[in-house]
Image: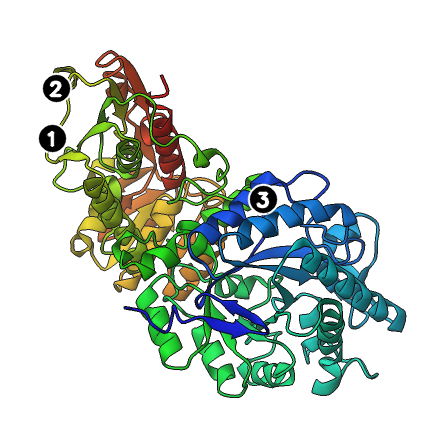
Amino acid sequence: MKYPNLFRPIRLGNTLFRNRIFASPQGFYNIGPDCLPNPETAAYYERKAVGGFASICVGDCIVDWERGCHYPFLFNIEDPHSLPGFSALACGVARHGCVASCELSHAGMFAHASQDAGFPLYGPVEMENKYGHVTRMDEAEIERVLEHYARCAARAKQAGFGMITLHGGHGWLLAQFMSPKINTRKDEWGGSLENRMRLPLKVVEAVRKAVGPGFPIEFRMSGNECNDGGYDIEEGIRLAMALDGKVDLIHVSAGNHEVMESMCITHPSMFLEDGCNSWLAREIKKHVGTPVATVGAFTDPGMMEEFIASGGADVVQLGRQSLADPDFPLKARTGREEEINRCLRCNTCFAGNGQHQILQCAINPEIGRELSVRTGWPAPVKKKVLVIGGGPGGMQAAITAAKRGHRVILCEKGPKLGGVLLCEEKVPFKSHLAQYLERQARLAEKAGVEIRLNTEVTPEYARAQQADVIVAALGARPSLPPIPGIELTLGAEEAYREPERTGEKVVILGAGLVGIELGLFLAGLGRKVTILEAKAGPTVDFGNMHTLAIMQEMPKRGVELRCSVRVDRIEAGKIVAGEETWEADTVIAATGQRPLMEEAAAFYDCAPEFWQLGDCLASRNILSATQEAFTAARDIGRM
């Protein structure tokens, strides 16, 4: 076996887990107003079990709805009516040989959803925080918390969960008591390490009594809170040592969810290396005998194998990677690593949760629709399909249609599949994007798609193919504003492809995602970069955690951003905006895209069925392109 350590079973408590790859705690927010699991919830978690994970953790199960809820759309496991939904979920996971774990959580002084419902905030000490006044928990409130943890742990076991995960990290209640900087109480519940660990250990004790001996208990903690107001790895080691021997697995994460500077470490951005938080688990494992789990930006089974083999951890947990590819364990075990869909860390999943409360993945169109994709394979009626355009949407449409049994021809006018995103192949923090494009090209070939490169399709060419279905995925082209001298600029795509053409001083027009990421790339090559934006602020999605990452990265790389700048004209070596001028060796236009609507519409009568995808309808992202392509290909051949 190529990864003998990664796939060696591990025993926690009295339970044997089939390998060392666990799916880390994740919530599922597409639930009803009752905040109880529904069939879509069960299907989402079961899909990962099908893919070979040893354990799936259901995150954000709130033990005290009145006092401990930070969002109003989390799982209310305190409600006895939650039992049927959780039972269906746990059964769906367990019947595939996977252990379902239930993450029990209490937000403590960050329980702003409970506060919005009219309840006070409770924490270790009386204080003011970002949500207002915090009331110090007295003995009665502490006893109430212990009872809630015990009751909810018993309910989880009754529902069929095979492990309890206690969330003691990321700044929630147990972490608040563990913190030497927050918990300055003078009684037995604070101050010294022994006293600060008293509540977490009492919770462990209460849960153990509720679930019985031998039932696995995992404790999730931050090895380092990664911010000026939090504790460091030395304190993290001491906290882990206090847990040693009292739980069955110490799960070492990082950061504090309520501190912005550590958010992109807790959920590593694309600017960090793979496995960037694993050093915390390695340090803690040196000091404890309890099995240790690591988490944070793992995508490569080889790296995971080496980390376990070298003694860095006993278990590797995958978060966003389990969305990008729920079949990761099965593919790694069966030698199909080249088929693994590696997480881009674009944080589209977080954006989807924040905007729609629906999980989505930019490169896996199954996520969020697990129930619907269980059916529809193969297509009832087989057809000849011509796909025009070999970008992300075109490739996904071709792959899905071919897998459903259609005969598929994919035409790309360039010499390589990948579309406009190929220009970012040289970008270090986009390495997983290049891997994704290469993977899709391989899968298209493996699925039996007839790929025709260097082929520009005209309506005449399309008619000559006599296809039953045409899928137009032509994409978009750069849109240039009517600024005098705009012809002197370099396009963003050209700058990405040939960065050597840019001089030392670079001015980029446009502070959208393309302009900012290009600025970060060029700054990493040593260029002095200024970005000018006509609007009052960057034109990026501030609901996406990736936006937080790029905004944090700009000052680190010395990228200057100027907004509310109306450029009057561009001259050789100079940009003029009112009374201000900027000298530049190179001016780059990153001012948006023009969808190729008319070009795509020209094919409307070239086949009995006609579909348009992605950018040729309106400016889109990878998420929209892959989802539309996947859905269109599934619709083909229904009749």
Residue beneath disc 3: 41
CA–CA distance between discs 3 and 2?
46 Å
* Disc 2 secondary structure class: helix
Q: State the image quarter where residue 203 is shown.
A: bottom right
Please state which amino acid type lies under the numbered disc 2.
Answer: Tyr
Circles 2 and 1, Cβ within 8 Å, touching? The answer is yes
Above/below status of 406 relative to 262: above
CA neighbours of label 2 inside 10 A, class few (<14), some (14 to 19), many (20+): few
Q: Which mark is residue 455?
A: 1
Please give left or right for residue 254 compared with residue 593 in the image.
Answer: right
- Up-down relation of residue 241 to residue 58 (above or below): below
Q: CA distance from mark 1 to mark 3?
A: 44 Å
Q: Which mark is residue 461?
A: 2
Query: In this rendering, which labeled residue sits more in front, label 1 or label 3?
Result: 3
Left or right: residue 127 compared with residue 372: right
- The type of residue carrying mark 1 is Thr
* Local SS, label 3: helix
Residue mark closest to the camera, 3 vs 2:
3
- Check disc 3: other Cα within 10 Å, few if <14, some if 14-19, many if 20+: many
